[in-house]
């Protein structure tokens, strides 16, 4: 199959988005207001993968509009990356009650959807945000045991080549709400991300 044109890409994404909105694969469907679809540029070279929607995102049915969204926008701006030029999605499409840690079954329930989103968008670089998204992406792209055994701190801001894909894990913007001192270093990672293109 040759290059997918824009309208075909959008049709494929719309099909996946319909599945996300009506998904009842796990119990998170009982506590969410919305199952969040990915958003952004369908021709994006960079795909950001966060963990899950926060409370504000769940209510408004939009990505990165809460406190961590403000930090995310600031990081993009500092690196001169247009928010409209990237694609953003979540590892888990429904909000996690009380921001608890995800269960493996919840990650697995959304896994095939994320696979489809990556296949459709075809990003040059996948940017998992934070520990859970990074670990899932590394596992998906068959990282070796030593890479999987690394702490997040060891791979944060490092470009990894796995199974033909460039993976660039970065701290989740929400971490900077609790540790503002991480921001200068995180801005450097976003600048590095821009330079990788």
Image (cartoon, helix red, strand yellow):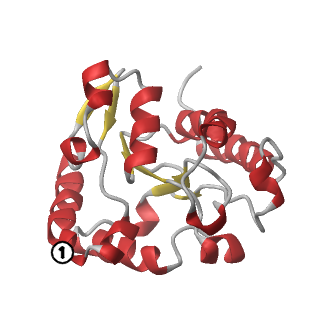
Which residue is nearer to you in this view: 93 or 80?
Answer: 93
Q: In front: 86, or 52?
A: 52
Q: Is residue 153 left or right of residue 12?
A: left
Q: Is residue 136 above or below residue 180?
A: above
Compared with residue 55, is residue 9 higher up or lower down, i.e. above or below?
A: above
Q: Which image quadrant for residue 158?
A: top left
x 25%, y 69%: residue: 80
The mark total stands at 1
Residue at the location (54% across, 51% down)? 42
| Residue in the image at 28% along x and 45% along y | 152
Q: Position of residue 88 (x, y in %)?
A: 50, 57
Q: Position of residue 68 (x, y in %)?
A: 43, 74
Q: Is residue 87 visible?
A: yes
Rendered-image quadrant of the N terminus: top right
Residue 101: where, in percent of width, then height? 54, 54
Residue 19 in percent (x, y) is at 79, 45
Secondary structure of the residue carrying numbered label 1: helix
Q: Is residue 181 above or below residue 123?
A: below
In this rendering, position of residue 159 left or right of residue 28:
left
**Position above or below: 53 against 25:** below
Residue 82 seen in the current view: no
Question: Residue drawn 21% across and 72% down?
Answer: 183
Q: Nearer the viewer, residue 86 or 105?
A: 105
| Left/right of residue 69 with respect to residue 186 in the rendered view | right
The quadrant where residue 110 appears: top right
Assess disc 1: are there few (<14), some (14-19) or many (≥20) residues with their C-alpha within 10 Å of its C-alpha. few
Residue assigned mark 1: 181
């Amino acid at each position: 199959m040759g290059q997918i044109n824009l309208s075909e890409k959008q049709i494929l994404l719309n099909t996946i988005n319909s599945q996300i909105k009506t998904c009842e694969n796990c119990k998170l469907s009982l506590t969410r207001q919305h199952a969040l679809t990915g958003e952004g540029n369908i021709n994006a070279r960079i795909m950001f993968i966060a963990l899950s929607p926060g409370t504000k995102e769940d209510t408004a049915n939009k990505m990165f509009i809460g406190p961590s969204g403000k930090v995310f926008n600031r990081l993009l701006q500092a690196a001169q990356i247009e928010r409209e030029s990237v694609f953003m999605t979540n590892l888990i499409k429904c909000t996690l009650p009380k921001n608890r840690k995800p269960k493996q079954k919840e990650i697995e329930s959304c896994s095939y959807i994320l696979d489809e989103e990556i296949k459709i968008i075809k990003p040059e670089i996948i940017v998992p945000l934070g520990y859970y998204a990074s670990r899932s992406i590394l596992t998906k792209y068959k990282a070796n045991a030593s890479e999987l055994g690394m702490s997040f701190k060891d791979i944060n801001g490092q470009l990894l080549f796995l199974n033909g894909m460039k993976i660039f894990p970065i701290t989740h913007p929400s971490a900077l709400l609790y540790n503002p001192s991480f921001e200068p270093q995180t801005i450097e990672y976003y600048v590095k991300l821009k330079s990788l293109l």
